[in-house]
Structure formats: structure tokens, C-alpha cells
Image (cartoon, rainbow, N blue to C red):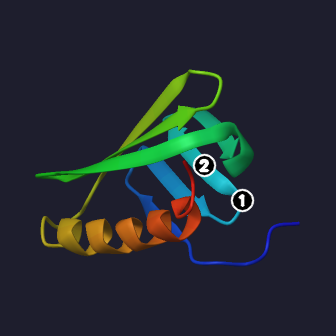
Amino acid sequence: MPVPGPEFVAADEYNGLVIDAEGAHFEQGPHAIDLPWAQLRTVHFQPLPSGLSVTAVTVEGPVFACQVRARRRSQVPAWSGELGAVLQHYLQGRV
């Protein structure tokens, strides 16, 4: 069982994402995928004017993406800071 650590959670009306000690969980409408850290090469994010775009690259090659819209544009910088810190925690030391 993973050791508890920081987590990032964001959701809108249709999509959601969780980044935590277990890995990345993306929901896009009715579709969802769990990507454990052992299967992930890296995770990137990009702030958008209305939210975040998060991309997970697996060690086997497939790439998965999720976009989440913020209710308020002012929420995007806070999300970016929180997500950046969580990703740094889990990805530090990876090659």
C-alpha cells in the first residue's frame, strides 16, 4: 500500500483528476483510467485560461490527457502551484 503523501484533486462538471501517492486518476465524461506511478514515465501540466490540461506519459508509450475547467479564472494559478508541488514530490529523483 502506498505511503500517504500530498494529493491534488480538481473537477468540473464533466471531468476530474486526482494525483496522489497511488498515481494519476483521470475522468473524462464517462471514461476513467487509473495510472499507477510504476506505469508512468512522467506527468506534465499546462495552465489554460479557463483551467488545467494534464498529460500523463506511460513507460510503455501511450499518452493520456485530461482537461479540467475552473469555476473562476483566479483558481487556475492556485491549482498550478498546488499541482506543481504534488508532481515534484512524486517525480523527484526520476530519470
Observer-nearest of 42 and 53: 42
Q: Do the residues labelled 1 and 2 touch (CB within 8 Å)?
A: yes
Asked if 7 appears above or below 40 in the picture, the reply is: below
Q: Where is residue 85 in the image (x, y as percent from the top left)?
A: 41, 73
Q: Where is residue 72 in the image (x, y as percent from the top left)?
A: 17, 67
Q: Position of residue 77 (x, y in %)?
A: 19, 70
Q: Residue 25 carries which label?
A: 2
Residue closest to the far top: 61
Q: Where is residue 50 in the image (x, y as percent from the top left)?
A: 16, 52
Q: Which residue is drawn at 47% across and 46% down?
A: 43
Residue indicated by mark 1:
22
Q: Residue at x 59, y 50 (%)?
A: 24
Left or right: where does residue 85 sit relative to residue 63? Answer: left
Kindly identify the amino acid type of the residue bearing the numbered disc 2.
His
Q: Residue at x 49, y 35 (%)?
A: 29
**Quadrant location of the N terminus in the rendered image:** bottom right
Observer-nearest of 17 and 41: 41
Observer-nearest of 90 and 71: 90
> In which image quadrant can residue 90 be found?
bottom right
Secondary element under disc 1, as helix, strand or loop, is loop
